[in-house]
Image (cartoon, rainbow, N blue to C red):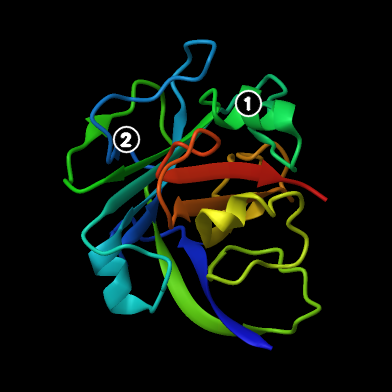
Amino acid sequence: MYKVTRFTVDPNDPNQDSGMWIGGETAYVSDWPLNPEGQPLLHLFSINCNTLSQQVHIPSLPQDKYISVFSTYSASEYFLDQVTYMGDELEWNENILAGCTYVSVSSHPLTSVCPVPPIPLRGVRLIEVELDDQDFPAFSFFSPTLPNGVKGIDHLVEEHQLVCQIYSGDFPEPYRDILGLPDANGYLFLRSGPASAHAPFDGIFFVQTA
């Protein structure tokens, strides 16, 4: 067994006291990211690392940093293939490195305003839970331990460390397919070593489905 910090969206509370929040019209980024088609990405969640670290112990979370995570999204068109990475080199190059998702890791809390309608701002509730080694968790949580079910990322963990899994179905309506399917998982990794040609970014976010 091992412990993780589960987070759930609080539909009645938009405050950011925990240090993490879902959606909202502002994010920690100086220039709003665009996908390869020139469309603005949607802000999924942000983290004030120092504030969150006061609530829970997350070894993979850096101090004095501000993180925002973005993804391609459409309410009317299929987009799952654009944000998925399961170990295929083509997915890596055309989806993740090309900018279908984006992670901003900043030392300064500069913000920009979303140029498209945002996910309604929501705070999160944090609770520590235990997982059995054989569990396949279908919920959102912080943990440095890779959960069962993640595929094709052996090379990634050489240079990056898991911060959290976020479950699409945990987002507020009508965004429970925010990651392409209601049962899809998104994974945030932060670089733990020097940049390389294969993984040049401080943060990586991608989606996997069963």
**Quarter of the view holding residue 118:** top left
Determine crowd level at label 1: few under 14, some 14-19, many 20+ residues with C-alpha closer than 10 A.
few
> Image height check: is 16 above or below 130?
above
Q: Earlier in the sequence, mark 2 or mark 1?
A: 2
| Residue 75 visible in the shown view | no
| Residue 124 visible in the shown view | yes
> Residue 20: image x %, image y %?
36, 59
**Quarter of the view holding residue 175:** top right
Residue at the outermost bottom position: 1
> Residue 171: image x %, image y %?
56, 50
**According to the image, label 2 marks what residue?**
25
> Image height check: is 94 above or below 66?
above
Q: Nearer the viewer, mark 2 or mark 1?
A: 1
Residue 152 falls left or right of residue 144: right
- The residue lying at 28 percent from left, 35 percent from top is 29
Residue at the outermost top position: 37
- The residue lying at 47 percent from left, 39 percent from top is 196
- Alpha carbon distance from label 2 to label 1: 29 Å
Residue 32 falls left or right of residue 36: left
State the quadrant of the N terminus: bottom right
Q: Nearer the viewer, residue 91 or 165?
A: 91
- The residue lying at 77 percent from left, 69 percent from top is 136
Determine crowd level at label 2: few under 14, some 14-19, many 20+ residues with C-alpha closer than 10 A.
some
> Residue 191: image x %, image y %?
44, 52
Residue 31 falls left or right of residue 69: left
Amino acid type at mark 2: Glu
Amino acid type at mark 1: Asn
**According to the image, label 1 marks what residue?**
93
- The residue lying at 65 percent from left, 32 percent from top is 92
